[in-house]
Image (spheres, rainbow, N blue to C red):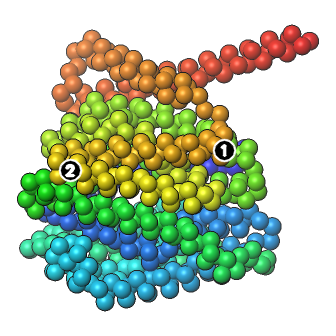
Amino acid sequence: MIIKNKIVRDTIILTVMQLFLDSAALLLNIFITRQLGTLAMGILSLTGSFLILIGMVSNGNAFLCISRLVSEEIGKKNGNPNRILKYGLLMCTFLSVISGLFLIAFSEPLSIKFFKSAEMSQPIKLMAAALPIGAYSACFKGFFNASRTVSTTAMADILEFAVKAIVIIVLTFAVKVPTNAAVCDIMVSGIIAGNCTSLVMLLFIFFKNRQVYSGRSSLSLKKYISLAVPVMAGGCLTSILSSANDALIPVTLRQYGNSVKEAFSQFGVFEAIVIPTLFFPSVVICSLSGIVVSETARAAASKNMKRIKSIAGNLIEKTLIFSILVAAVLMHYGSEIGTLLDGGELAGRMITIIAPVVPFIYLEIILEAMIKGMGLQGFSSLNYLAEYAVRISVVLIFVPRTGFYGIVASYYASNIIGNVSRFIKIMIHVKPDISVFKVFIMPTAYVVMTMKASELLLKLMHIHNESLVSIVVDVLLWSAMYIFMVLGWKNQGLSEKLFSDRKVNHEIC
């Protein structure tokens, strides 16, 4: 019960933090789009994709490695989590220095190949300064996450984003000519300032509350590297494929007939408005995923399959019930949301069309966290490889022929194939108690019924779905009725089970 309450408390803390960060990030995207235009937003999105890739290489997927391995070390008798953190910092130092030197040495070829512009070499060199700072910050965040002090990680993330956003806003107002290089310099400067600030805070808290462990670590540096390399390889593979996919979208849109400006503008709208909107409601699930990795790793280390089975069953059920409602709302009001966020007709149309795949997208967050927590990194890497192979193939084949609808097709194909594979793996490996009727058929029926009921009530109250207020009222009313029906049905099922148990006990007596 104590563990369960701790998970609930940590989830609430991370959810509030993630809600704040996602809201602020979306507002920052809207600000940049209004100030610098959709073309600049496209350049920033592509730069961000490149930074994620080089950041993953330079820190060795440190957050996930440290979270998992420190969690396992805490679960062992006479472990030494501090030594695991030390191994992570040593590995990050080596990787970030090598990655930084690589960026400086090959800045011009990377600028031409990745960004199709020689002027981007200077921002790429500036990225080298951000790598070690971001790597160390990721190590300490992973350590605090594994130690179940998620409030520290939450504060660091909020502080990091706040400083980054302030720097970006100030520099955006200061820039006179928003060239591609200037836009990237703004973004990288903001990232460096944010990472530095959060790292200082994390170091202060770590040394202030540092615990001394007398036990020997269960891992040597060599063993740590052997365990971290597969996790790092999986993260790097995902980042490489994601960056390749992002880089191909503007290219294939140009093959369709768009100009360079149109291609980057549409890519900017997709990355800055459409994708954040689809993921915005998943704050609870994203907050829970880091905890799931830690809790699953501890359960796996102690060979407690019963707990893993319970975690899997509960989370899959709740994720699907929630995501079906989100998908329905986005399908119904996608056009209005796209317009409200300054994405225009294109964003609204894309949100509406991609919304049905939301349950698969949200399910990935939970399933992947469990797979990594159980140490099934080999399957995770192979599955991501297959998923992105499908996504890139569809982009290359369909975007030059159908334009933006090819991107929609790639999202459908890759998410459905990849997450069905993850679901099957969890079902085989964990065998959670899942009922298709309970987690899919009934929630779908309820979401349609409550949507119609909400529309009827609004008509009876003479409220028309035209203003923002009426849309908010409709969504709140719709969601409340849906939650009431789902909870009512679950309670009915529990009552029937209790009645059945009493009947059996009576017959035995």
Q: CA distance from mark 1 to mark 2?
A: 38 Å
Mark 2 = which residue? 399
The amino acid sitting under disc 1 is Val
* In front of the other: 73 or 150: 73
Mark 1 = which residue? 430
* In front of the other: 17 or 408: 408
How crowded pointer 1 is (Cα within 10 Å; few <14, some 14-19, many 20+) is rated as some
> In the visual, does 198 lie left or right of 271?
right
> In the visual, does 283 lie left or right of 454?
right
Residue 371: image location, x then y, percent: 58, 53
Whether residue 213 is visible: no
> In the visual, does 447 lie left or right of 429?
left
Instruction: Indicate whether 39 appears above or below 289.
Output: below
Give the residue drawn at x 29%, y 32%.
331
* In front of the other: 394 or 92: 394
Look at the numbered disc 1 and give the secondary structure of its residue.
loop
Give the residue drawn at x 8%, y 54%.
257
* In the image, farthest residue toward the right: 509
Residue 507: image location, x then y, percent: 86, 10
Residue 174: image location, x then y, percent: 14, 74
Q: Pick the quarter of the image with the N terminus.
A: top right
Give the residue drawn at x 21%, y 43%.
405
The amino acid sitting under disc 2 is Val
Whether residue 88 is visible: yes
Instruction: Compare marks 1 and 2 and give the one earlier in the sequence.
Output: 2
